[in-house]
Amino acid sequence: MKFEAVTIKDIAKALGLSTSTVSRALRDSYEISPETKKLVLEYAEKINYHPNPIALSLKERRSRSIGVIVCEIANSYFSQIINGIESIAYNNGYNVIISQSRESADREMLNLQYLTSRSVDGLIISVSTETKDFSYLKELHDRGMPIVFFDRIVDEIETHKVIVDNYKGAYDATTHLINSGYKKIATVSNAPALSIAKERLAGYKAALTDHGMEVDESLIKYCAHGGMILTEVEEAIKELLKPKNKPDAIFASADKLTTGCLRILRSKGYTVPGDFGLVGFSNTDLTELLDPPLSVIRQPAFEMGEVATNLLLQMIESKRPVTDFETKVLTTELLIRESTRKKEAKAKPIPSLLK
Amino acid sequence: MKFEAVTIKDIAKALGLSTSTVSRALRDSYEISPETKKLVLEYAEKINYHPNPIALSLKERRSRSIGVIVCEIANSYFSQIINGIESIAYNNGYNVIISQSRESADREMLNLQYLTSRSVDGLIISVSTETKDFSYLKELHDRGMPIVFFDRIVDEIETHKVIVDNYKGAYDATTHLINSGYKKIATVSNAPALSIAKERLAGYKAALTDHGMEVDESLIKYCAHGGMILTEVEEAIKELLKPKNKPDAIFASADKLTTGCLRILRSKGYTVPGDFGLVGFSNTDLTELLDPPLSVIRQPAFEMGEVATNLLLQMIESKRPVTDFETKVLTTELLIRESTRKKEAKAKPIPSLLK
DNA sequence: TTTTTTTACGCAATCGTTCCCGGTATCGTT
DNA sequence: AACGATACCGGGAACGATTGCGTAAAAAAA
């Protein structure tokens, strides 16, 4: 069950030439006569010759392919990012190898080893929620592997990074809830170690204090897998529903958390925005068709993929080691829809404690 | 910017052995003394040696990786399939390379060439809507490349295939619409050349005639890109809304068509199921949260991925060419929700939110 | 005509690994 | 003592492609 491909040797043999001549003819070298070139080119075309990239990779120690690791592709945000990555990569003759960590540090490591041993020329990564140990990544980076982080970045490693202004996104969303008249705003956040979780949480807290509201730690819940497992969202919501400090609105910190919250609230018979206002990060294109249409913070995912890839290719193709790294920060967009509709005709609270 | 890896030569040099001995020691050959083995193994472990899969691929003409081509990963159906594929592949030590055709025959061909030249040991494919010319695939297959088709299969090529009972799925959905009291049922279908489109259309027609209803060709609309481009769905709906034969229900034949129809109908101010009943194929996990919750035909996508991969690995690892091919047909599931509520019914069905 | 230059091609090494041949000890057997 | 068996290890070709170097023949210059 093996699959025989046409090689440069077949051409050489058939034409009575050496492999070197054929190789040079195919690469249009000046030291091959026009007639021989024509001969080789035509024959190669005829038998449908394609150079073997594996042999090339072995020789050149590069593969013209880049590796991408995300937690899961069944997530609009990540699939949009990947589309952005592919669009730039293909235009530059690079192939993209996608792999999923499924929020597992082990699988992330496995994929990483596979990709590097397969000689990808660079990596674009959003780390899993579970990853605590970045030493392997760090070693890779130290040994010269070009890496670009996006979304969930690793502060310890100095390289190009692409993120959105998570702080501002969260701040704006929370402020929007406040301005809509919500008084007790909870948040369902991602794994606390994650950069995006920290930043979004900071934005949330800042919005509260800036508007004279207290930060209540019992209103902050974490989901270790970012909502990939629904029960953990259910658990978080259940905690929040304890009468003691029941909130009237929720800010969700990730795609799956946002829809997860809606799912749990509705399954428990609560209405949105009646019982709870809801806003969250999401790039799903179905949010406007949901019941209720969700107010969301949307990230420019496609563009993030493009930017990340451009940075990576720049590193890959640079002659000398890149030492001057930048962190590109794109801006989010707050799309206001039904799920955060103003609570009915009460006087708008005046923030008295603005600093 | 190159990335130096540890090779067998480094070990050989450091230990004063030949590469052959090191290679054999690592592969636990009987003709290497236990002491030498121990020495090599320990040193290999110490300097973190990993065999170079590229060199192996070149030598063995196999890569222990399989290629997957789908039209787009930002589609729950396909990402669920991929998860199924990966689960089996990883358990058997295979890696999965994913690529998207984005419904373009050109990109499909490009991906195909990339994957085969990269020595994937086999392919799992759902062809793009655009692909008319299967000669390249056929040649690949004739030359011994193991291929499994799923979803959108190619009748002309004899190999393993994994599909669902599209006919029955469509038949059941249409029957459900009829039983719900809808009188004029339109369908928005995929590119007519596609196997799935034909089968689903046949099921739709059969359900109509079996229930004494006429098949009206003007109620059958096609979307060449399966709803990936929203305007083509809009065009289809616009056609259907012409007063002459305005339907009261729509059966949509693919994931993006189903949500696309809802989107267009709602944007035009129509209500579902008030003005139109709506049911369609979909694997999105958000359909129950939509307004209205959508009745859908759901495919066992994860399982399909598993089945396809098992078939493929079986072909890859078979000593002799496989000639006895099978077509596995799984069954769909009709999930009845709000969007097809009986026209006369008053009682509101209880939506099941958590499954 | 002789020398130099140019043209056009082949040889062989290389990338990392495996594996077919060898080869050399160290035994044991006759 | 001589031979074969066994154990252990190295040399080198191979996988497909590129490329520096060498060189024969042809063309140009002397």
Image: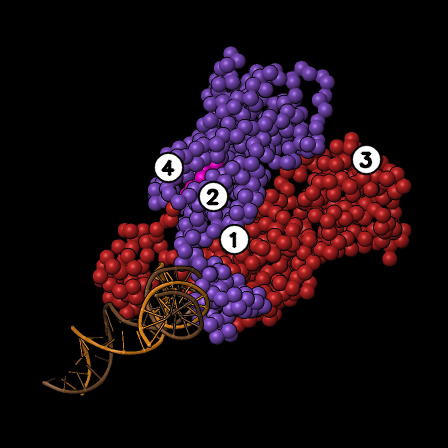
Chain colours: A red, B purple, C brown, D orange
Q: Secondary structure at mark 3?
A: loop
Chain of the residue on which disc 4 is drawn: B
Q: Secondary structure at mark 1?
A: strand
Decide if residue B242 is in sight here: no
Same chain letter for marks 3 and 1: yes
Chain of the residue on which disc 1 is drawn: A
Label 2 or label 4, whichever comes before in sequence order: 2
Q: Quadrant of residue A330?
A: bottom right
x 88%, y 42%: residue: A245
x 26%, y 65%: residue: A18
From mark 3 to mark 1, how far is it between C-alphas? Answer: 44 Å
Numbered circle sitting on residue B323 = 4
Q: Which residue is mark 1?
A: A97
> What is the x, y in percent for residue A195?
71, 57
> What is the x, y in percent for residue B24?
46, 63
- Left or right relative to B15: residue A187: right
For the residue marked with disc 2, what is the amino acid?
Answer: Leu
Q: Secondary structure at mark 2?
A: helix
x 27%, y 51%: residue: A46
Q: Quadrant of residue B333?
A: top right
Q: State yes or no: discs 1 and 2 in contact (Cβ < 8 Å).
A: no
Q: Start and end of the magenta stretch?
A: B146-150
For the residue marked with disc 3, what is the amino acid?
Answer: Asp
> What is the x, y in percent for residue A71?
62, 50
Given residues B256 and A140, the one toward you in this image is A140
Numbered circle sitting on residue B87 = none
Same chain letter for marks 2 and 3: no
Label 2 crowd bin: few (<14), some (14–19), many (20+), radius 10 Å: many
From mark 2 to mark 4, how far is it between C-alphas? Answer: 15 Å
Q: Nearer the viewer, mark 1 or mark 2?
A: 2
For the residue marked with disc 1, what is the amino acid?
Answer: Ile
Given residues A232 and A34, the one toward you in this image is A232
